[in-house]
Image: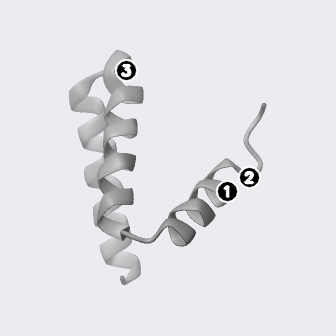
Amino acid sequence: MTDSDLDSVYTRLCKAMTQVGEANTPLFLARFAMLAIDTIDNSAIALNLIDDASEGMPE
């Protein structure tokens, strides 16, 4: 994926979160994550991504 592709995907994700509204964003992100995990279809990669995403987040 190019930087331009990544920017387009990120922009679409942000617009989708705006459309669903702040109250529905956590549910939207959870649904997106589950769809992405299913598409990845590799538990090791999915687990690594979960670890990477949680790194540096406040507890």
Q: Check disc 1 and report its element: helix, strand or loop.
A: helix
Contact check, label 1 and label 2, Cβ < 8 Å: yes
In the image, is 13 to the left or to the right of 53?
left
Q: Which residue is mark 2?
A: 55
Instruction: Identify which residue, 38 or 25, lies in the foreground.
Output: 38
State the separation of the CA atoms marked 2 and 3: 23 Å
State the separation of the CA atoms marked 1 and 2: 6 Å
Q: Check disc 3 and report its element: helix, strand or loop.
A: helix
Amino acid type shown at disc 2: Glu
Q: Which residue is mark 1?
A: 51
Q: Residue at x 33, y 76 (%)?
A: 4
Q: Position of residue 27 (x, y in %)?
A: 35, 28
Q: Residue at x 21, y 30 (%)?
A: 19
- Disc on the earlier residue, 3 or 1: 3
Q: Position of residue 7 (x, y in %)?
A: 36, 66
Q: Could you classify mark 2 by the number of other residues whose Cα lies within 10 Å: few (under 14), some (14-19), or many (20 or more)?
A: few
Amino acid type shown at disc 1: Asp
Instruction: Identify which residue, 30 or 10, lies in the foreground.
Output: 30
In the image, is 44 to the left or to the right of 56?
left
Q: Position of residue 51 (x, y in %)?
A: 67, 56
Q: Residue at x 37, y 84 (%)?
A: 2
* Total tally of numbered discs in the picture: 3
Q: Residue at x 73, y 52 (%)?
A: 55
Q: Which residue is mark 3?
A: 22
The disc placed on residue 27 is none
Q: Quadrant of the N terminus?
A: bottom left
